[in-house]
Every structure is written in structure tokens, then in C-alpha cells.
Amino acid sequence: MSRSIGQTMQLALAAILLIGSLNAAEPAPNPAPNEPPVHVTGTVPIRDFFRPPFINLPLVNRAGTWLIARFDTEDDHTGAMFLNLLAGKQQTIRGRDDRDIDELFWLDDRHVLMNQSHEKLYADGLFVTDLEDFSSAYAIERKSAVSVISVPIKARLKPIIWMSQDAYQEGFDRGAVQLDASLSVDRQDDHGGARQMHQVEHANKFIERTGTEATIIKSFPNLPKSQTLSFLADRNGELAFATAMIAGVESLYFLQDEKWVQSPLNMDHYDLVAAGDTDGEIIVVGPRQENKPRALLRVDTTSGNVTGTLFQDELYDAFVQRIFRHPVTQKIIGIQLYRKTLETVWFDQDHIDLQKQLNKLFPGKAVSIIGTDVEEKRIVMAVFSDRQPVEYSLLDLTKNELRRIASSAPWVPIEQMQPMQSLRYKTRDGFKVEGYLTLPKGTTKENPAPLVVLLHGGPWARDIWEWNGEVQFLASRGYAVFQPNYRGSTGYSWSFPTGDDWEFKKMHNDVTDGVKQLLKTGLVDEKRIAIMGASFGGYLALCGATYEPELYRCAITEAGVFDWSLMMKTARRNQYESVRYQIYQRNLTGSNQPETGFDAISPLKHIDQVKIPVLIAHGKDDNVVDMEQSQQLAKELTRYNVPHKVLLKKGEGHGFSRLDNKVEYYTAVEAFLAENLLKR
């Protein structure tokens, strides 16, 4: 009797375990580009906490013969690495000039689709590389803002993309289109094969088509008058679903007979996650239930009816990061989601057993499968902890071998990193929420550390147990770091009253409550506390400085929102490019209400209460939160003689992306904290 895949996996893993954990952790030579040296002693430079990942999200092809990944080119750019798993040879490609390769997708077993950007802000195009001829990379799209929707299983050289801003039609939303990835947008190029056949078959028409038009083989119908939010392919990679918004109300559509049909499903209560296992089925995060986290449900889009429950956690709403499908049947076999950390839940016994064995190989760490070949014989894994950045390994079941690929941050000295602990605290209205605390070396109740309250953005995001460069940077400089999640943080909405996702002042109160309860541990110095955040976290940081002037000694904001009436005006100006105005209009004001009441949630209107120094940072090309927010904050602080420093950087968007600007910003943060917190 032949062994199942699960049995093969278990036998191979058992063999590896018998060899010993040392061999498993330090296997064959590293196949990635040469890793930079690790700093063993002394203070870790700021740069090393914020560099782009040395290698990121390696993916194996269906044949299990090649592995691709993005990698850091060491000059603040990202390129593409290609590793031949059979021959052990590698090749790297990087963009020219100020260009980065942002995403990689397997088309078929020898063709790779690459998404490239310019100056870390602007779309530069989609390119295809043939692994049998690396010198032949060619563009199939240029300059438009695009996202890859899918690679159809039955037509792998015909990817489907969403062209959200067409560079050849004044930036209008072109919608979903299908491209011929065997054709170059540059007419004079001739790479043979399918391209030459296409030119012969459509010779006259092709001569008249230039730019992206030369590669578009199908344009999908436009959605009814609305603003598109997303497109989604079915389990086979064929375009099947879309979401759009009108007046702040989200609607779901399914593609039927080349027309978009609106589903009766009320999207006010559901969040779209993925396509299901059958035609017309989707997976969604379901509506709130009394005293239960939101579940992952199966829904029929035609009727809008729930047909089953895929998964429901005991503590967290289903915040799904990824869906795993069987490589042959395409049925869902697992999900990767956020609980305390990023975890994987499997639905078949083979993979449940596999995960248990992998966890044994890496005790005390989070282990995730991120890809396999079609036979599941070569498995790519990501392993991390609170002290270890993500490290990638390849489990080769044909050789019973576990090979290390590379660390995402090999320059980080793990032995100098500090552990992160989770803790739960109670809000003033009686709800429990989770936060994370990282203490610097040498912290005791007799020697309490100065504290930085570090706030995530969103607010619909969350902090988890993981290696975090910003946290470890602050801890390395002697600060305790508290990361409080709060109502609105993803995963917790089920435990708070309906509507609290938009109660910004309550979120501020949650942060305050968490800090005050942390002070009771005696591990942090109550007289030396800073509050810091970016985007919505920057908003909460200024709220702390404004409404809790006796609690904090200084505040740091990056790309923050401080005046919600100003935010509404900016969103209104851009309402034809973004749905943000519709969402704010519906949830912050109500469609029939005047724009009043913003003063109560806008700390900029209460700057007279701020008594502590503030560091302000913002990108001048931010199209999410206008730089005017930070400029107005600086103006008001000057008016009230509040000490402040300002860092505005040209060429940066919502958050700093260039390494030199990150280093400049965190150098300013280090000096600002030292000036305001190190003295007792």
C-alpha cells in the first residue's frame, strides 16, 4: 500500500528529528546571496533595525525545481533571487536606477511575473522573466497602478490584474483586465514563441496597439456606478467576485454571463476573505455574535445564505492572513491567522500532524508553511520568535533534508534582542484587551525602566508577538516598550459594544487604562513615560499628550491625524480617487448630519492643554494623511510656546520608506527620547 503525503512527511520529519536539533538548525550551505555579517558586540546601529528584509517570502514553483524570493540589494533597493533547487545555482536580478522589485508571482514553472516600482512611490510596470534566459526580461505593462488578482490555473501565461490607475487614460480606473504575458508592450521586441504567433495572427491590429494595449487580451465588464474596492478570483484563478462602495455602503458582486450581479449579502456585517471550494461560494468573516468571536463562514453569493462554518476561535475574531489550498484539488485545507501571534490552523489530519512535527523542530518559535510544490515534497517554511527575525527554510522530503535558505535580517544579533511578553488589562468600562511588553536588559523593580508607549495605526490593525525592529531598537536604547491593543484593534471587536470601532476617544481611554495598570507592576518609571505612534497611532499619541498631560513626559507622531474636520476636507477633495470620504461621512458624521462634533475627537483643537515636548514627522508626498495635519500641529504648538521639533521629508508618502530617511527619523527619535526621558 502506498504511503499518503502525510505519512511521507511524518517519516521524513522523524528522520530529521533523529539526526538532532543541531543538524536541523544548521543544515546545508546557505543558498541565498551572501549574507551580511552579524554585529556581535556593542550597540546595534539604527540602520540594522530598519533595513529592508534581506530575503522575503520565498516561493517554490509547482514542479519543485525553482525557488524565487525578493532580496535586499544593500543599497536600499530590492531585487529578485532565483535558485535552481536541482542544480544548486542561483541568479539575481535588480531594477535599474531608482527601482525596486516589489512582488513576485509564479506564472508557470519557468516564467516569473515581477511588479516593479520607481522611487518607492510610483508604479513602474509588470515584467516577465524566463528562467531559461534571464537576459530576456520584458515588460507586459508600464507605469499604471496595478495589482495582480490571479494567475488562472488553465492559462498561466494570462494573468488577471486590476488596473486601478491607467497611466494611458489620465489615471482612470480601468478595472480588471487579462494580459498576455508572452507579449512585450514594446512592439519592436521579439522574444519568439507565443509572441511571434500572436503577431502573425493579429498582425494588423497589433501594429496599431501600443503600451499596455498591446498585451491586453480581455477587458472585464465594469462594475455598476460605484468605486471599486477589490476583485477576487475563484479557486481556479478565474475572476469571479468584486466589492464596491456607494455612499459608504459596501456591496458584493459576482460575475455571471459576463455581467456583474449584486449579491444580496449585506456587507455591513461580513468581511470578504477568499473564494470558497465551489462555484459561487466565498469565505467571509461573519457578523457579530453575542459573547463569541466572529467566525469564518461559507456563503453562497447568489442567495446570500450562510452554508457552513469553516472556523471559529475561542478568543479572537477570525483575522485571516492567508488561505491554504490543496495544490491539486484547490480545496481549502488551512488558514493562517492572527491570534496571540501569526498561527496556522489546518483542517486535514495530514497537515495537522505535519505542523506538530514542525513545531517540535523549532521549539518556542512560530513556524508557518508558506508554500509547496504541487506534490508537497518541497515545503518552504518561515520561522520566527520575539527575538529572532523571520528565517526561511526548505524541507525537502525527497531527500529527508531540512535546508536553511536565509534569515530576513541576518545582521541582527539575536542574543542582544529582548523577549516580548503578552499581558491582558481591563478597560475602565470593564472589557479585557491584550498588550505586549518588552523590557530592556537589567530592568527590575529596584531599577525600573523609562517607558515608551508604542501605538499601532489603523485603528483596524493590531500588534502581535513577533520580532519587531522598532520595539527592539527602543529596547536596545534602554526603554521599556508597551504596545497596547485597544478597541478597534483587529481580533477584539466581538468583545466590545457595537459601534466602538469608531469611538476614537474610547480608544484613547483604553491606552491610558493599559498604561496605568502597567505602572502597578513597578517595572517602569511612572515619571519617565513617552507616547509614540504613526498614522492613527500618531493621532493617539497626540491625544495622550493633550488629554493626559500629567502622565507623559513627551510625545512623538509620524504621519498623524490631529484634526478630523481637516481630514474630512482632504478626503472630500480626493473622493473620486478614494473611498475614504464615503467611509468617514457614513461612520463619523452620518449621511444626514452636518460635519460637527469633530472638535471633541480632534486634539489639534485643544493644543492649549499640551504641556510636553512633541516630535513631529511627516512625508511631503503623503496621499493618505495630508502633510498639512503636521504643519498645523507645529503652528499651534508654536502659538502656545510648546517645545517641538519637526521633520518633513520630500519624496516620502504615508510613512518613511527610504532607509536613509528612516535612519534620520529614528536618530531624531533617539536624541529626543534621551533629552526628555533619561533624566529622572
Image (spheres, rainbow, N blue to C red):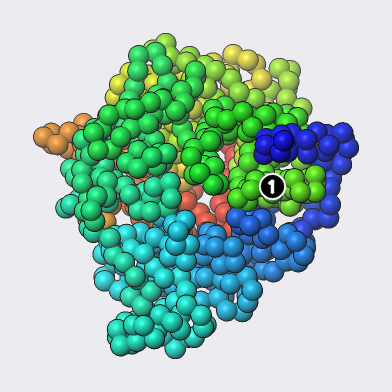
Residue sitting nearer the eye, 647 or 532? 532
In terms of secondary structure, where does tag 1 sit? loop
Residue 614, position in %: x, y?
47, 41
Residue at horizontal 43%, vertical 82%? 197
Tell which of 352 and 315 is nearer to you.
Answer: 352
Asked if residue 47 is positioned above or below residue 283 in the image, the reply reads below
Viewer-closest of 629 and 496:
496
Look at 55% across and 46% down and name the residue there. Answer: 327
Q: Is residue 670 above or below residue 131?
A: above
Q: Quadrant of residue 270?
A: top left
**In the picture, which quadrant includes the C terminus?**
top right
Q: Amino acid at mark 1?
A: Lys
> Going by the picture, which residue comes out furthest to the top?
430
| Left or right: where 306 falls relative to 195 | left
As drawn, is 438 to the left or to the right of 510? Answer: right
Q: Quadrant of residue 523?
A: top right
Q: Is residue 640 visible?
A: no
